[in-house]
Amino acid sequence: MEPLTDLAQTASKLYGNPLSLAGQNPFAQRLSAGYDLMHRLGKDYIKPEFGLRTVDVDGIDVAIHERVEIDKPFCELRRFKRFSDDPATLSKLKSQPAVLIVAPLSGHYATLLRDTVKTMLKDHKVYITDWKNARLIPLSEGKFSLDDYINYVQEFIRHLQGRYGNCHVMSVCQPTVPVLAAVSLMASRDELTPLSMIMMGGPIDARKSPTAVNNLAMSKSHEWFEHNVIYRVPTSFAGAGRRVYPGFLQHSGFVAMNPSNHAKSHYDYFRDLIKGDDASTEAHRKFYDEYNAVLDMDADYYLDTIRVVFQDFSLVNGTWDVKGIDGKVERVRPQDITTTALFSIEGELDDISGSGQTEAVHSICSGVVASEQKHLEVPGAGHYGIFAGSRWRNIVYPQVKDFILSHQPVVASAETETAKPKTGEAVAKPAKPVAKTAAKKVARK
């Protein structure tokens, strides 16, 4: 469709220019709007930028430098490093908790969490998993499975632990399952686990309140998915020959969930173009530039996810075995997690991960004491509302911030030992003694 969309863009500009002969046509504005809409419906959308240059920290503009800390074949660990020349602000930034945000690998790019990252940057050191488009990864890099995803998450957690002593992990939607698996495996090996896990709108137990997404995965066989939605990458891309689940199929599925809403949105865009409403048309472009930008997923990873999460329910049934980078196969045992606090978050109107699916994490993480667990259902929020928009910023984030802070150990230093908290200022809990924690763990076992 690329030649047609390029032609439509040219025609839109031709009819939209009042100095051209075509632009003097009495229907020129309508024709220009129609061709513009045709161009946007058919064009290929590139990966958007995070575009975070500054963040406000208590009234001070702090500069953001985005950089890649670990570059893996299928993912980049991206850090948003903050800089300030204000001594007090700089001291505050250094003492704040480190958080690994695990973005979903489910069709959209990690930039979909831009609002999540921007808000978190006010009070945290933020890292995010930026998954790569499988159609651009050469076959020489091998395949990518759900086991590889879990191994990536463990490597990233260890990287933050090596830099800061420990960290907190936030998973949004799809990664709640592999993140829980990663931390469970670390706990089973008696490795240091994250201070807390924040799990948002994910299919921990997809049997509860199944949505249209769940029903499709449950109603079709594994073979059906392999034969009907897996394709080879064309020769025009770097990943030529790789078996993938194409992003355009996932995008079509998203649109099919609310076709009338998207149709109305595009019709409103057409009318706004005719009226010359620049603010509304720009808002539409900004949203759909993000929404329409999709990536392909490696076939092995996609099919593994369908089988493990939506058909066999391996996590909640206790039958999930994962192969590590050393080739050793280990059983995922969430009950072995004892020293990581747990916060689950759901949207009341979530039509992707239904009610109770994320909350199920509490019943399978039986080793975490009740006082270290918390659940939040956000009234009136859909799937995206729990990590973006006003409900995220005003309802969810304040509780996430407090939860992380309450499980952040105080770093002993000359300043922290003598400094006293101001009235009303939150005080972090001290770190648990290692010996005591280990003893409690043995006692539970």
Image (cartoon, helix red, strand yellow):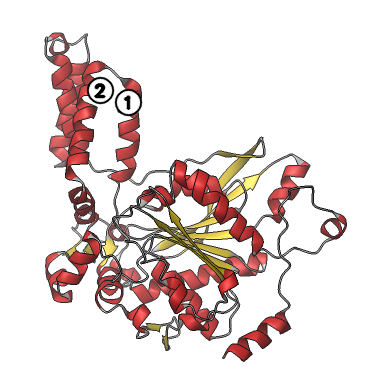
Q: Badge 2: few (under 14), some or many (20 or more) residues near its Cα, within 10 Å?
A: some
Q: Position of residue 232 (x, y in %)?
A: 18, 64
Q: Which mark is residue 280?
A: 1
The answer to whether residue 63 of the structure is visible from this angle is yes
Q: Quadrant of the N terminus?
A: top left
Secondary structure under tag 1 reads helix
Q: Position of residue 418 (x, y in %)?
A: 88, 57
Q: Position of residue 283 (x, y in %)?
A: 35, 31
**Separation of residues labelled 2 and 1 (CA atoms):** 7 Å
Decide which of 50, 46 is in the foreground and name it: 50
Where residue 285 sits, quadrant-wise, is: top left
Where residue 314 sits, quadrant-wise, is: bottom left
First in sequence: mark 2 or mark 1? 2
Where residue 20 sits, quadrant-wise, is: top left
Q: Position of residue 433 (x, y in %)?
A: 73, 77
- Name the residue located 19 percent from the left edge and 58 percent from the top edge: 235
Which residue type does callout 2 highlight? Answer: Asp
Secondary structure under tag 2 reads helix
343 sits left or right of 433 in the view: left
427 sits left or right of 162 in the view: right
358 sits left or right of 88 in the view: left
Q: Circle 2 is placed at which residue position?
A: 272
Q: Badge 1: few (under 14), some or many (20 or more) residues near its Cα, within 10 Å?
A: some
